[in-house]
Image (cartoon, grey):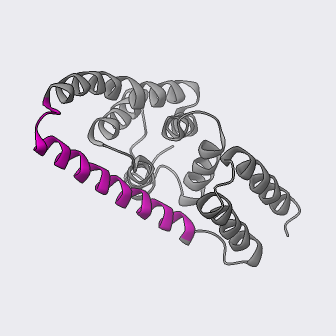
Amino acid sequence: MRNSQGQSPTALGLFLIFARIGLTSFGGGLSGWFLREFVQMRKWMTEEEFFNGLAISQALPGINIKNLAIWIGYRMLGRKGAVAGFLGIIVPPGIVIVLLGTLFASLMRFDVTHLLLEGAAAAAVGLSLSMGLTAAWRVPREVMPIALMIATFVAIGILHWPLIWTVLGAGSVSVALSYFNV
C-alpha cells in the first residue's frame, strides 16, 4: 500500500513507527496517535478502515492498542506486518517500563514524582477524550447507530453493566443492523 507521497510501508518501518509511538506515549491515547500517524499523516489507510479496526480491536480480548497494532500491521503487510506491529508496540516500551518502574520506585518518596504522574494522567484522559469524540463524530447520522452509541454509554458509563455482555449485546445488534442494512 502506498500513500500519497509514494511511500510504501516495510516491516522494519512499521516496527519503528509502533516502537516510537509506544516509547513516547504515557497513560493511554495511543489510538489517537495511530489515527494521526497512519490515516492523517501517511495516508496508508482511510478513516473508515481505521475505525473498523479500532472497533474490532476493542471487541477482542486483550490489550486494545496491541490488537490495533496487529490489525494495522496486518492490513499493511500481512503476517509480517502483524508481527512488526506486535513487536513494535510491546517490546521496546516493555523494556522501558521495567527500567522506569525501577527508577520510579526509588523516586516515589519525592512530592514532584506524584505531581509528574498526575500531569501524565491528565494528559492521557485528554487524549482518550479526544479519540472518543473523534470516533463519535464519525458515527453515521442515523437513528440506530446513534441510539446504540448512547445505549452503550449509558449501560457502561452510568449503569456500570459488565463490559463483556454490553459489548457482545450492542455489537451483535450493530452487526445485525449493518448486515440487514437497517
Which residue is at the front of the view, 57 or 34?
57
Q: Main secondary structure of the magenta part?
A: helix
Q: Is residue 166 left or right of residue 105?
A: right
Residue 117: in magenta span? yes
Picture layout, residue 92 above or below residue 122:
above
Task: Count the numbered circles shown.
Answer: 0
Residue occupying the point 66% across, 48% down: 163
Residue lying at 43% horizontally and 28% vertically, measured from the top left? 11
- Residue 59 locus on image (x, y percent): 66, 44
Stretch of the chain drawn in magenta: 107-136
Pinpoint residue 89: horizontal percent, then vertical percent. Answer: 41, 32
Q: Position of residue 24 (x, y in %)?
A: 27, 41
Residue 78 inside the magenta-drawn segment = no
Q: Residue at x 68, y 61 (%)?
A: 155
Q: Would you say 42 lies left or right of 69 here? A: left
Image quadrant of residue 98? top left
The vertical placement of 44 against 143, above or below, is above
Residue 150 is situated, as x and y percent measured from the top left of the image, at 66, 70
Q: Quadrant of the C terminus?
A: bottom right
What residue appears at the point 63 percent right and 52 percent down from the top-left corner? Answer: 52
User: Viewer-proximal residue, 73 or 55?
Assistant: 55
Vertical order, 51 against 148 (above or below): above
In this rendering, position of residue 163 left or right of residue 138: right
Question: With 17 as the anchor, is 178 left or right in this view?
Answer: right
Taking the view exactly as shown, the residue that stands out farthest to the right is 180
